[in-house]
C-alpha cells in the first residue's frame, strides 16, 4: 500500500481566536487609545459611513435620516486609526430604562470583539447615567447576536411575533439589569 497525501483534516491550520489588545483587561476609566480600534460618540460626519454599513449588513436597512435622529450620548462608533468606521451601536435612554436599537459591525471587521466592546462601553455609560435596565430585540434566527448578548448577561423576556420584515421573522426580547455606578 502506497502512502498518499495526508487526509484533509490533518492539513488544515488550527483555528485560534484573533488577538485584540483592547479586549485585555484595562484600568477603570482608561481610554481606547492603545488599540487598533477606538470607541467614540457618533458625529454627523459619520452618517454616510453608518448608512453604508447598514445597507451592507441588514436586509431592511435604516435610512441615513434614521441615524441622524438618534445621534446623542448613547450612539457610538468603533473606528480604526484612519477614522474608518468598523462598527456602531445605536441606543437611547428614557429615565431609568434604555434600549439598544441597532448594532452592526462591518463584514471586514467581524470576529474581533467589536460588538462585545461596543455593548460593554454602552452599558458602562448607561449605568453612570442612571439606567437600571436595558432592553433589545434580536432576530430569532440571529444566533450569533443572541450568544453575544447572553455572554454579556442579557436574558430572554419574550417574543414579538412577525416583528421583522424582509424576511418576516419573530424577534426575541432580551433584557439585562445594570448595577448602579
Image (spheres, rainbow, N blue to C red):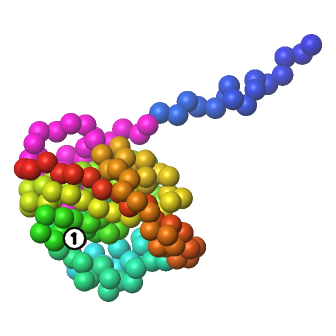
For residue 17, above or below residue 64: above
Image quarter of residue 101:
bottom left
Q: Is residue 138 left or right of residue 36?
A: right
- Give yes or no for residue 30 being in the magenta stretch: yes
Front residue of 41/6: it is 41
The single residue placed furthest to the top in the displayed view is 1
Residue 32 visible? The answer is yes
Magenta part of the chain: 17-43
Residue ID at (42%, 70%): 53
Residue ID at (18%, 51%): 178
Mark 1, Cα crowd under 10 Å, few <14 / some 14-19 / many 20+, is some
Reading the image, the residue beneath label 1 is 92
Q: Is residue 85 left or right of residue 27?
A: right
Rendered location of residue 99, percent (x, y):
26, 66
Q: Is residue 111 left or right of residue 68?
A: right
- Give yes or no for residue 86 being in the magenta stretch: no
Quadrant occupied by the N terminus: top right
Rendered location of residue 51, percent (x, y):
38, 77
Residue ID at (50%, 60%): 140
Residue ID at (73%, 31%): 8
Rendered location of residue 20, percent (x, y):
32, 42
The single residue placed furthest to the right in the displayed view is 1
Q: Is residue 53 left or right of residue 142?
A: left
Front residue of 84/95: it is 95
Front residue of 163/42: it is 163
For residue 76, above or below residue 132: below
Image quarter of residue 80:
bottom left
Rendered location of residue 64, percent (x, y):
35, 83
Amino acid at each position: 500500500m502506497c502512502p498518499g497525501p495526508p487526509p484533509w483534516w490533518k492539513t488544515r491550520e488550527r483555528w485560534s481566536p484573533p488577538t485584540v489588545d483592547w479586549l485585555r483587561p484595562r484600568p477603570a476609566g482608561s481610554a481606547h487609545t492603545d488599540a487598533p480600534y477606538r470607541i467614540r460618540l457618533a458625529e454627523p460626519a459619520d452618517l454616510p459611513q453608518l448608512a453604508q454599513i447598514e445597507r451592507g449588513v441588514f436586509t431592511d436597512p435604516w435610512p441615513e435620516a434614521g441615524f441622524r435622529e438618534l445621534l446623542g450620548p448613547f450612539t457610538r462608533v468603533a473606528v480604526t486609526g484612519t477614522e474608518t468606521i468598523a462598527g456602531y451601536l445605536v441606543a437611547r435612554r428614557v429615565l431609568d430604562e434604555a434600549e439598544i436599537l441597532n448594532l452592526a459591525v462591518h463584514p471586514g471587521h467581524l470576529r474581533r470583539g467589536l460588538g462585545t466592546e461596543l455593548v460593554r462601553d454602552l452599558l458602562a455609560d448607561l449605568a453612570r447615567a442612571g439606567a437600571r435596565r436595558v432592553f433589545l430585540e434580536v432576530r430569532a434566527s440571529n444566533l450569533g447576536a443572541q450568544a453575544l448578548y447572553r455572554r454579556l448577561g442579557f436574558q430572554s423576556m419574550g417574543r414579538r411575533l412577525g416583528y421583522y420584515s424582509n424576511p418576516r421573522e419573530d424577534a426575541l426580547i432580551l433584557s439585562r439589569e445594570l448595577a448602579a455606578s
